[in-house]
Amino acid sequence: MDARNLALCQIIGIVNEHEQAGHALNCLDEIRAIAQRVLAPCPQIPREELVEGTWYAGRGRANVALWGWVGRGDRRRLTFLTIALVSHQPNEGRGSYMPIDDGCFQPFRAIAEGTVAEAMGMGTAARDNHCAKLLEI
């Protein structure tokens, strides 16, 4: 999906949220303001604002990474876990937070993983939380 279609989907989602909450969006200027906010450049997320266990879109060795713990004992540390193509083959990697001039991954936006709207009905709550017929994003 290209950036314009993604922005359009986000705008439609925002409009639907407003309608469900009972807010009126009857002015073209409001929709323009939403579009400008959605299409605005996205600054890098500061390290202290990252949430453990969250996937992020960004730039570095890969374009998507999970902020999580690796290692054991005193070598345990928070880092980005990535999957990237190396010589045309999927390869896992670990990369530190990259400020403007150092590191391996720059996070720009958290990725909403969605919630199960309709479970597959596999019998256990754990499976129903992860196996879906429909996903709400």
Image (cartoon, rainbow, N blue to C red):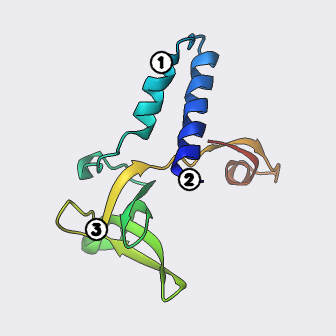
Answer yes or no: do the residues labelled 1 and 2 have beta carbons within 8 Å? no
Q: Residue furthest left?
A: 101
The amino acid type found where label 3 is placed reads Ser
Name the residue: 33% across, 50% down: 50
In the picture, measured across the screen, residue 113 lies left or right of residue 81, that is right
Instruction: Quickly name the residue at label 1.
Output: 30
When asked about the image quadrant of residue 105, the answer is bottom left
- Pointer 1: residues within 10 angstroms few (<14), some, or many (20+)? few
Residue at left offset 43%, top offset 39%: 39
In primary-sequence order, the first of circles 2 and 3 is 2
Residue annotated with mark 2:
2
Which element is circle 2 on? loop
Q: Is residue 71 visible?
A: no
- Numbered disc in front, either 3 or 1: 1
Q: Amino acid at mark 1?
A: Glu
| Percent x, y of residue 44 | 29, 51
Q: Position of residue 51 (x, y in %)?
A: 37, 49
Residue at 67% across / 53% down in the picture?
130
Whole-number angstrom distance, CA of label 1 to CA of label 2: 23 Å
Q: Earlier in the sequence, mark 1 or mark 2?
A: 2
Q: Quadrant of residue 101?
A: bottom left
Q: How many numbered callouts? A: 3
Secondary element type, mark 1:
helix
Q: What label sits on residue 40 in the rendered view?
A: none
Q: Which quadrant is the C terminus positioned in?
A: top right
Q: Nearer the viewer, residue 30 or 21?
A: 30
